[in-house]
Amino acid sequence: MLTSKHQHLQAEPCPVARAVDVIADRWTLLVVRDAFDGKRRFGDFQRGLGIARSMLTDRLRNLVAAGIFEVKPASDGTSYQEYVLTSKGSQLFPLIVAFRQWGERHLFDEGEAYSQLLETASGEPLELMSPTTVNGRTIRPEETTVRKVR
Amino acid sequence: MLTSKHQHLQAEPCPVARAVDVIADRWTLLVVRDAFDGKRRFGDFQRGLGIARSMLTDRLRNLVAAGIFEVKPASDGTSYQEYVLTSKGSQLFPLIVAFRQWGERHLFDEGEAYSQLLETASGEPLELMSPTTVNGRTIRPEETTVRKVR
């Protein structure tokens, strides 16, 4: 299945579609979110998410195959394996923040509590993330065009 | 199903998880991407994506129910219906850009062509989007903490 998925990806010139094919799965995204929160071990992901072990095994295998996690020996010298975000995986941070900020703004009732992502040093929430031009100006969707390659 | 999904969402204090539950589906995201490219009609989405009509019907229904699309009469006076992004839907732009930018950087071979999102006026690609502090400083994941509500 990985092979046919890879072949499919090779034919697809849209980066959105390729990224969606790799990462837009509920459990996959929640595992990556938890990795940004510092989780590294199978049992920690499993308990935090309440996911079936077989499904977590499947998602972790795919995340390693996709180069998003790498498997390392436990940092404390025990025999556990740890799943650590690679550089490619760490660069999913804007994507997770984009999910978070859209959720915060649109999926909670007024006054309803939600978990917040804060700058540790200041305790402040992050700025709302927006696409910008190379000059740093916020750009609206209607000011953009997709140049297709086929 | 919508009811039970809604009840599930109500219990979930993490905005990432709520957003993932609403939008992290392959076809849903590709329909939203195409809406940002200017598509509005069933037939245009259907032909562009090569999606089965029943699946597109399902995704459009969910997108309307979630308040991401609204249904409008055709802008040209014909009897077609158009699916138009609401304000809530338009605010998915950073999410689609995050998928695109991660895909561009990590899912194409060197020299391989991909469709590009450009500022129409200048023809320039957008800046790489990054989470920032309220002061505009780019922030790395390890400088952040999630404050949980339970």
Image (cartoon, coloured by chain):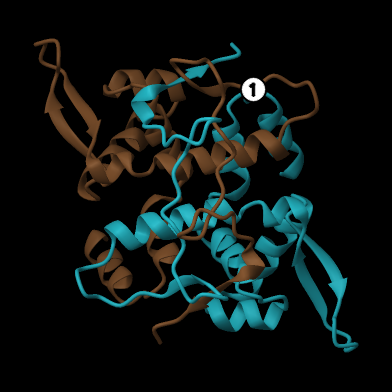
Chain colours: A brown, B cyan
Whether B64 is drawn above or below A67: the answer is: below
Q: In this view of the protein, which residue sits in the foreground, A44 or A145?
A: A145
Whether B127 is drawn above or below A144: the answer is: above
Percent across and percent down for residue A6 are 26, 65
Q: In this view of the protein, which residue sits in the foreground, A115 or B144?
A: B144
Looking at the picture, which amino acid does disc 1 mark?
Answer: Tyr
- Residue at the image point whose x is 49% and y is 15% from the top: A122
Q: In this view, does A73 lie to the left or right of B18?
A: left
Whether B80 is drawn above or below A5: the answer is: below
Label 1: chain? Answer: A
Percent across and percent down for residue B37 are 60, 73
Residue B55, visible in the rendered structure: no
User: Mark 1 sits on what residue?
Assistant: A114
Percent across and percent down for residue B135 are 53, 31
**In which quadrant is the N terminus of chain A drawn?**
bottom left
Q: In this view of the protein, which residue sits in the foreground, A51 or B134?
A: B134
Residue A115, visible in the rendered structure: yes
Residue count near mark 1 (Cα–Cα under 10 Å), binned few <14, some 14–19, many ≥20 = some
- Residue at the image point whose x is 40% and y is 57% from the top: B101
Q: In which quarter of the image is residue B85?
A: bottom right
**In which quadrant is the C terminus of chain A drawn?**
bottom left
Percent across and percent down for residue A23 are 39, 50
Q: Is residue A64 left or right of residue B92?
A: left
Q: Quadrant of residue B48?
A: bottom right
Q: In this view of the protein, which residue sits in the foreground, B23 or A106?
A: A106
Classify mark 1: helix, strand or loop: loop
How many callouts does the rendering have?
1
- Residue at the image point whose x is 85% and y is 87% from the top: B76
- Residue at the image point whose x is 50% and y is 36% from the top: B136
Whether A107 is drawn above or below A149: the answer is: above
